[in-house]
Amino acid sequence: MSDAEIAALLAAAPVEPCGGAALHLLAPADWLRLAELVDPADFAGLFVADGRAHALFFRAAPLLVAVALDNGAYPALSPAIPEAGWYERRAAETHGATATGATDTRPAIRHGEGDAAWPRFDAPADEGAFQVGQGPVAGLIARPVHRRFTIAAGRIARLEHRHGYAHRDIAALLHGKSPRAAARFAARLAGDAVVAHALAFARAAEAAGGCDIPPRAAALRAAMLDIERVTAHLLALTAALEAAGRPGLATRLGRVRDDIAAAVAVLFGHRLMMDAVTPGGLEVDARPEALPALAAALAAAVPSVRLVGGFRVRRALGPAAALARDRARAVLARVSAIVPAIEAAPPGEIVAALPPVSAAGLGSAASSRGMVHHWVKLHDGQIAAAALIDPAPRLASRLEEAAVGLDIEGFAVLEACYAVPTGAIDG
């Protein structure tokens, strides 16, 4: 990344106030130039609102830029940033905004059985290659996504995903609601990142209104986020070990995860801490009588998680071993500090009032798969526009690349360890 050139480009651009991150308004040429200068790995997402296309980048801090739509069109970022392709497709479907020069113009959302424009999969060109489909309907509880594997010589030569079966357009459901009423919808984007999305949304609303939350709420929010990341990592490890043929260790980790969730249900009123985080603070306070059970469950996770780094387990996990080891390390880094952090939370109020402002704000929070971001625009304290960004679409693209060269069994283990939720993609 050319930091000096990026800084010069941004310094010359008009700036609009936005709580949490200033909004830089770029000319089309500067929009395209920025896409060439930034590290594609820093791209977080793209959305359309207020007659503009917005791009969010995140490294140490968020960078939010926008370009005005010209007759409903804007310059595509996907030629320079391939992972922008899915967001451009979504923007075309939900806002009718055309990304000029986009690398992929296929529809992103399934509109009905007879939709002739629904993306088609390319037939294999190599002799002897064939295709295998998976989903979106299966004889078990499964994610609503269609995968098409192109197999050559027993290995995956290409993997394509077709999403859009579970499109909800949660961002549109937020319109006209108060931030506290809308928080329930924002939290339900992905079941393994309930706290992360609720917190990112709350922070966006708080940044727009300049609201300071009580210290106790801030401390408990941080602990809740750590709990959620630990349980999400355990869930992914459990699924990966099951797929790798290690049911004994998978059962142990699954039991630990369930014990943590049971303690959390007492501590915050819900196994997933659903609707506990609200703009301005928290809806519920921690119940200290649940802390001994939570401490015991978290301590029980340590010996089982350490086994993930063992040679035999790593060999069984195959191509997913490195990712599984990263997840195990993340668990071990957090479990011992969660209960002391809750015990050390200062006493006092847990929620503050939000002022009825007309302003915009950006909020971010860490999930088990990366940073999630929410942007909201308020008008007299009500939501006029919103965007919800999850790393899932980018991870799905990386999973397609990582699958090449694997057999189907190896892919099943890798896919389980990636743990990409369809709901976070379809939104």
Image (cartoon, rainbow, N blue to C red):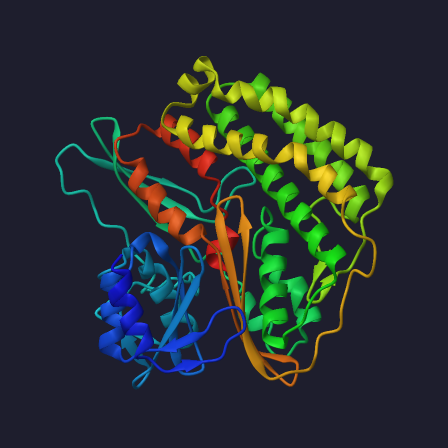
Q: Tell me if 282 is positioned left or right of 160 in this view.
A: right
Q: Nearer the viewer, residue 107 or 378?
A: 378
Relative image position of residue 127 (x, y in whole percent):
12, 35
Q: Is residue 205 above or below residue 215?
A: below
Relative image position of residue 271 (x, y in whole percent):
72, 44
Relative image position of residue 64 (x, y in whole percent):
41, 69
The total number of labels drawn is: 0
Q: Is residue 209 above or below residue 159?
A: below
Q: Tell me if 380 is positioned left or right of 117 in this view.
A: right
Residue at 22 percent across and 69 percent down: it is 33
Q: Nearer the viewer, residue 21 or 302?
A: 21
Q: Is residue 219 above or below residue 55?
A: above
In the rendered image, which quarter contains the N terminus?
bottom left
On the question of residue 27 being in view, the answer is: yes
Q: Tell me if 239 is positioned left or right of 185 in this view.
A: left
Q: Residue 81: which quarter of the image?
A: bottom left
Q: Residue 355: which quarter of the image?
A: bottom right
Residue at 51 percent across and 30 percent down: it is 329
Residue at 66 percent across and 76 percent down: it is 177
